[in-house]
Amino acid sequence: MIKDYFHKKRPIYSLEVFPPKKDTDVSVIYDALDEFKALHPTFISVTYGAGGNTAENTFAIASYVQNQCGIEALTHLTCAAIPDKLFLTNFLTNLYRNGIHNLLALRGDKPVWMDEKQFRARYYEHASDLIVDVKESYDFSVAGACYPEVHQEAESLKEDVANLKIKVDKGVDFLITQMFYDNDAFYRFLEEVRKAGIEVPVLPGLMPITSYGQIKNIVGMSGTKIPEEFMKTLEKYKDSPADLKKAGLEYTKKQMGDLLEHGVDGIHLYSMNKVEIAKAIYE
């Protein structure tokens, strides 16, 4: 299980992939995984898709990572995707019987197809509620999400960390952060986390900006801030895709180098399913 690796070696290197959209040839992700394997990540996480509408692919991809690539698979599961306890039991049983013993428990955002009333009526309100039932069902290594720049629904960093403490106390073994571009924000967050008595490993999550179109999604959907100097560089190269991609990769490399110098537990790379980006960062 992933939690055991933190006792064997640090820093840990990991990747995130996502199931292709329904109208995309699913074989592309398996081709990518065969190449990701050569980078020897400690684990590969597989997202669940909005509201679980890629659930079958998520399970198949995670099984391929675990059983064909020989790499620990971390399967995402959102509260919004669970209609009842039976669904959870069946999902966990399928994972466990297929050798997948790692789970990232998330509240998840409201799926596009779900109205507000349905979302509020979900079986599990918070990831912390889900974690309790997961731990009672099987011996999973459970990861949780955290937000260095404060969750958008929290009023303050203090409140956010207090909620995180509840989640960790319910059984989280390690944490993975939302993407960020300001390392100082991460260091401030980590200081508060440790002050609160949260001792589990925290993996910084990095996503290289390789196209100008990414910026709107990153800032709009996650609330992640882009430092002024880096934003100036991106603006400078917005009409030159090749130069912007190069600048984005260089920024992430420097960010990663600084984090490693500060002794972080590892690096989690949001790969966007792009092998060449992962290779450029890891090599």
Image (spheres, rainbow, N blue to C red):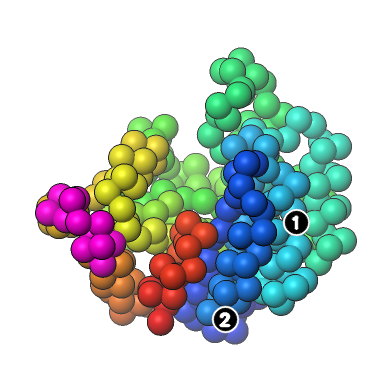
Verify whether residue 257 appears in magenta.
no
Image quarter for residue 72? bottom right
**Point 76% across, 62% down: residue:** 63
Image quarter for residue 262? bottom left
Label 1 residue SS: helix
Verify whether residue 238 appears in magenta.
yes
Q: How many marks?
A: 2
Q: Amino acid at mark 1?
A: Ala
Q: Compared with residue 64, is residue 158 higher up or lower down, i.e. above or below?
A: above
Identify the main secondary structure in magenta: helix
Q: State the image coordinates of residue 39 (x, y, percent, origin top left).
A: 53, 79
**Point 65% across, 19% down: residue:** 118
Q: Compared with residue 114, is residue 98 higher up or lower down, i.e. above or below?
A: below
Whether residue 3 is visible: no
Q: Is residue 8 left or right of residue 221?
A: right
On residue 60, which mark appears? 1
- Residue ID for mark 2: 38
Q: Which residues are magenta?
A: 235-246
Q: Nearer the viewer, residue 83 or 37?
A: 37
Label 2 residue SS: helix
Image quarter where the N terminus lies is: bottom right
Image quarter where the C terminus lies is: bottom left
Q: Is residue 201 left or right of residue 49?
A: left
On residue 91, which mark appears? none
* Label 1, residues with CA under 10 Å away: few <14, some 14-19, many ≥20: some
Q: Earlier in the sequence, mark 2 or mark 1?
A: 2
Q: Amino acid at mark 2?
A: Ala
Q: Residue furthest top?
A: 117
**Point 59% across, 37% down: residue:** 50
Q: State the image coordinates of residue 153 (x, y, percent, origin top left).
A: 42, 32
Whether residue 137 is visible: yes
